[in-house]
Image (cartoon, helix red, strand yellow):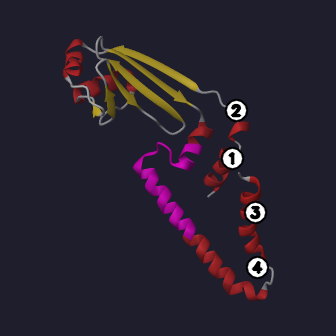
Amino acid sequence: MLLFASTGITLNNATHIESTPVVVNKSAIVPTALLKQIQSEPSSEKAALPITTADWVSSAIGVELTGVAGEWSDTEVYLSLPRPGGDAWLVIDRTNGEVSYERTDRGWVSYLNDLHKGRNTGTAWSWFLDVFSITTLVFCITGLLMLNMHAGNRPATWPLVGLGFVVPLILVILFIH
């Protein structure tokens, strides 16, 4: 709850938080045998690299590519490698085997904000967010039921709960266009 509340604040005030992205570039040349394998692949919209090529590029550049679908054209293979808190991409030139890789890291605040939004976080985190959200809903609903049980002795309960709904609604109606 604290993580999601604090990242809610950082997301709401993103323009006030300075960040200097760190960019890492790497390059390599695909060996001739593997280049011929890439050149023999047909150009298609989305397909993974051949396993031997993916393994070689993974070890040469230091990034896991197994099963990552790339965009194939006659001249290159482009792999988009988005991740929380940054971005990365890899291009293999199909004519000369030149590999270009770039990774951008935007820092911990960006990383935590992306976790908050579930951006580029994978299936496990997506499931965690769903379970966490359902648990939070149960917590809120049972809290309302408990308020209902004890509201008889506290006359300000329902007006305060109502304000929690009405104030944001008024702000939306009046100030968000």
- Name the main secondary structure of what is drawn in magenta: helix
Quadrant of residue 162 within the rendered picture: bottom right
Q: Which residue is mark 3?
A: 170
What SS does tag 2 mark?
A: loop
Are there few (<14), some (14-19), or many (20+) residues within 10 Å of tag 3?
few
| Three-letter code, disc 2 | Glu
Measure the alpha-carbon separation of dots 2 and 3: 32 Å
Q: Which residue is mark 2?
A: 18
If you read the primary sequence from the N terminus, does the residue marked by circle 1 or circle 4 appear first? 1
Tell me: residue 159, above or below residue 172: below
Q: Give percent across and percent down for residue 126.
A: 45, 53
Q: Are marks 1 and 4 in contact (CB under 8 Å)?
A: no
What SS does tag 3 mark?
A: helix
The span picked out in magenta is 113-137
Give me the residue at 23% from left, 21% from top: 38
Give me the residue at 29% from left, 37% from top: 67
If you read the primary sequence from the N terminus, does the residue marked by circle 4 or circle 3 appear first? 4
Q: Which residue is mark 1?
A: 12
Front tag of 2 and 1: 1
If you read the primary sequence from the N terminus, does the residue marked by circle 3 or circle 1 appear first? 1
